[in-house]
Amino acid sequence: MSTRLIAEREHHDRQAAERWETLTRDDLRFADAEFLDHETWIRPAVAAMGPLRGRAVLDYGCGHGMAAVVFARAGADVTAFDLSPGYVAEAEARAKTNGVAVRFAVADAEELPFADNSFDAVWGNAILHHLDLRRAGAELQRVLKPGGVAVFCEPWGGNPLLRFARRRLPYPGKDRTPDERPLVKADLVPLREFFPTLGFEGHQLFSMVGRAVRSRVASRCLSVVDRGCLAVVPALRNWCRYAVIKMRKIGTSLN
């Protein structure tokens, strides 16, 4: 394992250990809406995966495992992995507490331990920006079934004002690994080598201010403004805080 990946695993193992110290059984139980609505882009990104019942779904970099549980509740056959053994342990506990069956593995996203053409859909949240995207793209293309879809929600770095704030201003959840940074348009180039029809949507343009003012009413109002502005001027998506990236493997699934 490379020095970069060792540092990533150690960082996230520390995070998982700190979380585990405060988690209770009640903390592990949750309703789907707690995951689907905790950020404005999650619910529409999950919908972009299409129907989940009866499909083989990979939670790619599963972290705390909430997505895996939601997908299993929806009737998917779920496999989940993470580089961090600590987070896999938490995700396993969350699945067990919520009474769903999920297969878990500790694995490297750039060298997946799964067979070719294994999954109908792949989900990832804040994971691609940690990776070598050419290696990750090759592995995603390999494990997806023909016609399969991969959906990723990723921090976006096209807004210079936001880049300054991320570098200079303190805010909750800022703890990062040394090598990670938000994606930019150039990062999509190696992914398009494997997924030529790749597309992305921007989320949280003006509504990112809601993180600072902490007002749900303001956030909802600004989200409406965002949708209107992005519909009229699609180029503004480059200034958004987050991107939802959708990739489909060319071909027709036999399932």
Image (cartoon, rainbow, N blue to C red):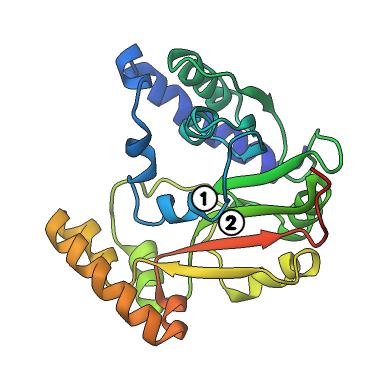
Residue at the image point whose x is 38% and y is 34% from the top: 32
- The reply, left or right, for residue 23 in relation to residue 12 is left
Residue at the image point whose x is 70% and y is 71% from the top: 197
The location of residue 91, given as percent across then percent down, is 52, 24
Residue at the image point whose x is 83% and y is 49% from the top: 142
Q: Which quadrant holds residue 246?
A: bottom right
Tell me which amino acid carries mark 2: His
Q: CA distance from mark 2 to mark 1?
A: 7 Å
SS type, badge 2: helix
Q: Residues within 10 Å of mark 2 (few under 14, many from 20)?
A: some
Residue at the image point whose x is 52% and y is 50% from the top: 126
Point out the residue furthest to the right here.
Answer: 116
Does any portion of residue 208 appear in the rendered image? yes
- The reply, left or right, for residue 224 in relation to residue 30 is left
Point out the residue furthest to the front here.
Answer: 255
SS type, badge 1: loop
Mark number displayed over residue 82: none
Q: Residues within 10 Å of mark 1 (few under 14, many from 20)?
A: some
- The reply, left or right, for residue 131 in relation to residue 236 is right
Q: Quadrant of the C terminus?
A: top right
State the residue position of label 1. 126
The location of residue 64, given as percent across then percent down, is 48, 30
> Do the CB atoms of the residues marked 2 and 1 lie less than 8 Å apart?
yes
State the residue position of label 2. 129
Pick the residue in front: 65 or 70: 70
In the image, is residue 148 above or below residue 34? below
